[in-house]
Amino acid sequence: MTSRLLAQKIVIIGLGLVLLAMSGASFYHSRRLKEPVVLGPGVTAVKQLADYFEPLRGTANNCNVYLLEGRERGATMLVLGGSHPEEPAGRLVAWILAENAVVQKGRLIVILSANRSASTVTRLGGAYPPDFSIVTPWGSQTFRMGDRWTNPLDQWPDPEVYFHYPSRQQLAFVDIRNVNRAWPGRPNGTLTEQTAYGFMELIKREQVDIAIDLHEAELQYPVISTIVTHQRGQDMATIVSMTLTDMEGFKIGTEFSPRTLHGLSHREIGDYSPALSLLFEAPEPFLDATRGITTREQLLTGKDEFVVKAGKHGLLFEKIDEKGWPIDVRVGRHASALLQVAETWGEDHPDKLLVITEVPRYKDVIEKGVGSYLRDPAKGAGRVVYE
Amino acid sequence: MPVVTLFYYALVAFVSVILAVNLLKSRKWERDVLYVLVLLPFLLRLLRLK
């Protein structure tokens, strides 16, 4: 090897190492970004998912479980945020609950990172931003962007075909890392299956009456702006949908969970536990395949000229205009919907009420912004935990 | 870590070594750049960074 060739290789390998160090540092930091949660006055205990299923201890998916015990006994509601972390409205509503909600009657169990591993990675090849920030009165709070699927660093490789357990239904290979295709889970399965199993154990042990899984969807997906419900929750979901549409000024429909489509929370939680299972969908243009450049601004404003154009061509299942679908609107919809579920449940179960206060409704979130309901960790005084 | 995952990491290490050997053997700078760029995602996975 000539000295010129050697010098050439040293320079190119050196540049490669610089690239490796820069990208590696970025990925390392993103995966370990700490998200503070200031425990609100209603939080009575913080457990971990491994307290319900021990094999999850030490894994990326040993998420926090926030318990808000009411002053009086009543119904128990489980709220799952972050099943798909790239749908941030669900996580933010869960954050608002953990930092603000006070339960007068019954119990609220809140999960902020149902698939915590998926919150530590972004869509491979998707050019997602690594994080996003919400402006608050005290500054801003940064959250991990996340993905739909468990981080391949925690579960890899994927099979050619994913056979759902226990139905044996064939699903897309990548959905073996999708916690909302893994219900009811399997104790000796993959990390994603074990995560779903852990939640089923929680649901059974805590005697959950209502389980709500918070999601967002692309406008090109037909299941959008809706409550998807197990057949045992059909009446309640329909009343909630009608009440919200009539009283709160936004339209939300009802979809019935197909009995033969397996792995989803609205199907399997209802089939494998006594809990009523509901799944909420809000519109998120950030997820649409026809979107433009994928940025933090697009994620939070929900504005995208290409998605608007797709709408003009009749390709969407939800309306969109130049105003977009701001995060405040999406969070507000979820907040009102889950509060309305609690109220509607109470009308049918006067002997087992669920009364939640201090949680903003749709109009409040739009008026004041999501950030107004996030607490300053610097003033947490020993009541700060991290996701 | 499941056995199949260990096997996949071994495959990644094997491909990384092959790429590194080819990088050292090549005599064109364009190929050197190509080998380095292809090698990067393999190293990021091997180091469990991405």
Image (cartoon, rainbow, N blue to C red):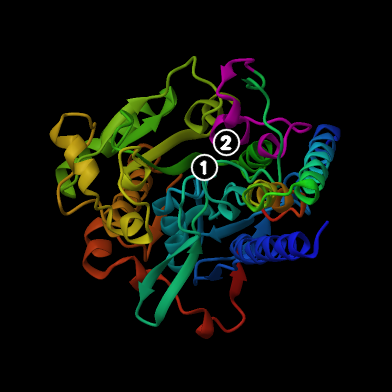
Measuring from the top left, give residue A98's x and y in whole percent: 49, 63
The reply to whether callout 1 and callout 2 are in contact (CB within 8 Å) is yes
Q: Residue at x 62, y 36 (%)?
A: A177
**Alpha carbon separation for disc pair 1 and 2:** 7 Å
Residue A127 lies, with reference to residue B5, above or below; the image says below
Q: Residue at x 34, y 35 (%)?
A: A227
Query: Which SS class for mark 1?
Result: loop
Along the viewing direction, whichever of A98 and B44 lies nearer the viewer: B44
Does residue A253 show up? yes
Residue named by callout 1: A148
Along the viewing direction, whichever of A378 and A239 lies nearer the viewer: A378
Instruction: Look at label 2 and name its amino acid.
Output: Asn
- Sequence order check, earlier mark of 1 and 2: 1
Q: Residue at x 53, y 54 (%)?
A: A110
Instruction: Look at label 1 and name its amino acid.
Output: Arg
Q: Are marks 1 and 2 on the same chain?
A: yes
Measuring from the top left, give residue A348's x and y in whole percent: 36, 37
Along the viewing direction, whichever of A177 and B48 lies nearer the viewer: B48
Q: Is residue B22 left or right of residue B36?
A: right
Does residue A319 show up? no
Q: Which mark is residue A44?
A: none
Residue named by callout 2: A178
Q: Chain of mark 1?
A: A
Measuring from the top left, give residue A19's x and y in whole percent: 63, 62
Residue A35 lies, with reference to residue A118, above or below; the image says below
